Image (cartoon, grey):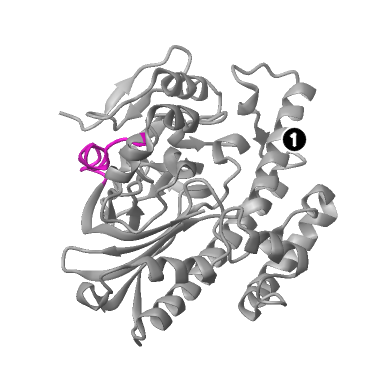
Amino acid sequence: MKAYEVTQVESGVPIKSWTRGVPFEEQARQQLINLSRLPFIYRWIAAMPDVHLGKGATIGSVVPTVGAIIPAAVGVDIGCGMMAVKTEIRAEQLPDHLSEVRSAIERAIPHGRSKRLRRRQRDKGAWGEIPADVEAGWSLLNPVFERLCDKHGVLKNTNNLHHLGTLGTGNHFIEVCLDEQDAVWVMLHSGSRGVGNRIGSYFIELAQKEMERLQIQLPDRDLGYLQEGSVYFDDYVEAVEWAQQFARINRELMMGKVLAALSQTLKLDFSARLEAVNCHHNYVTRELHYGQEVLLTRKGAVRAGLGDFGIIPGSMGAKSFIVRGLGNAESFCSCSHGAGRVMSRNAAKKKISLAEHEEATRGVECRKDQSVIDETPAAYKPIERVMAAQQDLVEIVYTLKQVVCVKG
């Protein structure tokens, strides 16, 4: 029996869904059907086990296209992804109470809508001047950014430099975790921040205007696309690649700060080995599948080619996994990017109590207040079921359990 289920779509390509044993909401299914009916989709669409409703395109989808690209299928959190390192620290070297470890990370990394981040934007930061590592990172990014701004001036007025090396809000996080052998890991999740959002929103709007200009009718206006060779296509591809580079550098800068904060707080010198880095899960790239070069969009999905390392995090209080790809061609060598939401943020805030959140995150040093209820484990699909549904896509290398979680 195949691990996936196939939905045949009238006037569209099939949908292959790795969703056995996990919720698959009807609205998300309809979004995938809408996508499948676009004329440039190649072979089929793959839905990962964390699939759920998104804006325009479904989160947890893998969309191969030929000759066109859908900006909303990439989304506005361009280059969002994960980074993880395994350290030499052992569980027994951690203090009994981890509040100071969490506080040290929160002091080191501007996050959320904190006063420190607003101050950094206003007067170059809590450190006074922009930190040298952030300046160095921006020097690599600035030339292409200036060129993009020369063509598209609306991109200039963002918090680009001031967001570099910062965590953000929502489901972005920094965690200290333990693996099965009690080794300490550091894992973080973030992306291209405000500037990536501006790039995504701007080109989604341009694609919508292109559809109006060409009088192309779509089942959802957010599925507006840019055809290869058209005026905005190359600019969008360049902007997405730039945002992915921003996201990669952003994660690297934060990881360096977190490791330094750990060393200082624990009064330990240690080395850290990169295990899975820059594991993007909102992006588009050119890949070869079934003998055809395609533009492959992974929206809430991770590349899982044969031997590729990836990270599949659970929610606050749940397990996370370092995985190795099995190179399954039918998923276009992809896997899920996490557990996937089972209820909206508003629904979670209404249905889940603070007491339930505190119980679900027992043993984790993290925020226990009302403002993070929408990120509590009950708002997500059970990560164990998600992993079971994709056994033919990845193999588990390490199982991690967080002991500290910093949310934006």
Q: Residue 189: which quarter of the image?
A: bottom left
The outermost residue toward the front is: 355
Residue located at (62% from left, 55% from top):
243
Above/below status of 97 relative to 297: below
Residue located at (75% from left, 67% from top):
143
Q: Position of residue 246 (x, y in %)?
A: 61, 61
Above/below status of 87 relative to 151: below
Residue located at (52% from left, 53% from top):
408
Left or right of 369? Residue 179 is left
Left or right of 146? Residue 31 is left
Question: Please, what secondary structure does the residue beneath circle 1 have?
Answer: helix
Residue for badge 1? 206
Q: Position of residue 157 (x, y in %)?
A: 80, 53
The outermost residue toward the top is: 10
Please name whichever residue, 223 or 355, is drawn nearer the observer in this view of the structure. 355
Q: Position of residue 58 (x, y in %)?
A: 48, 31
Please name whichever residue, 204 or 16, is drawn nearer the observer in this view of the structure. 204
Q: Residue 301: which quarter of the image?
A: top left
Left or right of 285? Residue 388 is left
- In the image, the segment drawn in magenta is 379-393
Tell me if residue 166 can be seen.
Answer: yes
Looking at the rendered structure, the kind of residue marked 1 is: Leu
